[in-house]
Image (cartoon, rainbow, N blue to C red):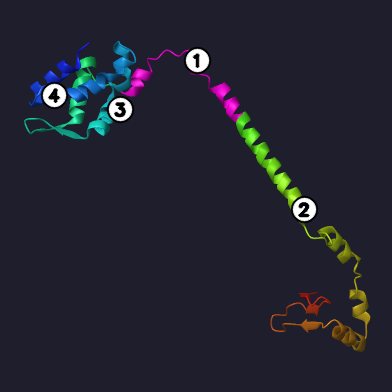
Amino acid sequence: MAHSFHHAQSSVRKWGGAVEDYLAIHAWFEEPKKIVADFRHRALRHQAEGIFLAEQVFGVTITTSAGREILVRWIGEQHVTEDLGFTPSAADWLRRIEPAPWMNRSRRLSRALAKQRIDELNARRNAIDERTRQLRAARPAGPSADDIEALLDSVPDLRPVMEEAPPEELADLFAAFDLTATYDKEQRAPLRLAGLSRTGFRGDL
């Protein structure tokens, strides 16, 4: 395998300058040899994505000692092409990986994550239930919604009686409950009654 120094010498022949102008970039491409010291280290950076990553590390261009501005992408492409003969993609490398059972443990992980999420939701539900019990215990004493509904259901329907009552009795009834009758003649809207309760609440009847 070519050394970073030899790649840098090749760069000098192509664009001029000194070996030191290019050595850091070529050494960066060879750095994965620390992980695996054979050709497999090239899978990490000897590919198109690795070349663009080099731009993020070293910038879009470098200026050589001769004052010439060179694209980092050119240097990366030179390095990869000299080692492999062309510039593969990361997918080209990954497709050559032989799957092993330990690589596909997503099912167990998914179950663990699902259990964790279920536990979190159960904890939230328990917290909501406890807060609901606290609010109910702190609620002021008084008739419940069911009590109020039952009370309203017990009020007799006086409409048949009112239909047959003479005007004098209706006038007394309206006066006793402060009832008012509203009728929109132009719109021919239904007759609307409004009354005032003992508590001072006015509402439509």
Q: For the residue labelled by badge 2, is the local secondary structure a helix, a strand or a loop? A: helix
Q: Which residue is mark 3?
A: 49
Check contact, mark 1 vs mark 2: CB within 8 A.
no
Q: Which residue is mark 1?
A: 102
Rendered position, 136 above or below 89: below
Residue type, label 4: Glu
Q: Residue 130 appears at what percent x and percent y?
A: 73, 45
Quadrant of the frame with the N terminus: top left
Q: Earlier in the sequence, mark 4 or mark 2?
A: 4
Check contact, mark 4 vs mark 2: CB within 8 A.
no
Q: CA distance from mark 3 to mark 1?
A: 26 Å
Can the viewer see residue 77 in this picture?
Answer: no
Rendered position, 69 above or below 111: below
Q: Which residues are magenta?
A: 89-114
* Callout 3 crowding tier (Cα within 10 Å): few <14, some 14–19, many ≥20: some
Residue type, label 1: Trp
Q: For the residue labelled by badge 3, is the local secondary structure a helix, a strand or a loop? A: helix
Q: CA distance from mark 1 to mark 4?
A: 43 Å
Q: Which one is nearer the viewer's eye here, 108 or 25? A: 25
Residue type, label 2: Arg
Q: Which residue is mark 2?
A: 136
Q: Earlier in the sequence, mark 1 or mark 4?
A: 4
Q: Which residue is mark 4?
A: 20
Q: CA distance from mark 3 to mark 2?
A: 61 Å
Q: Is residue 96 magenta?
A: yes
Q: Earlier in the sequence, mark 1 or mark 2?
A: 1
Q: CA distance from mark 1 to mark 2?
A: 53 Å
Q: CA distance from mark 3 to mark 4?
A: 24 Å
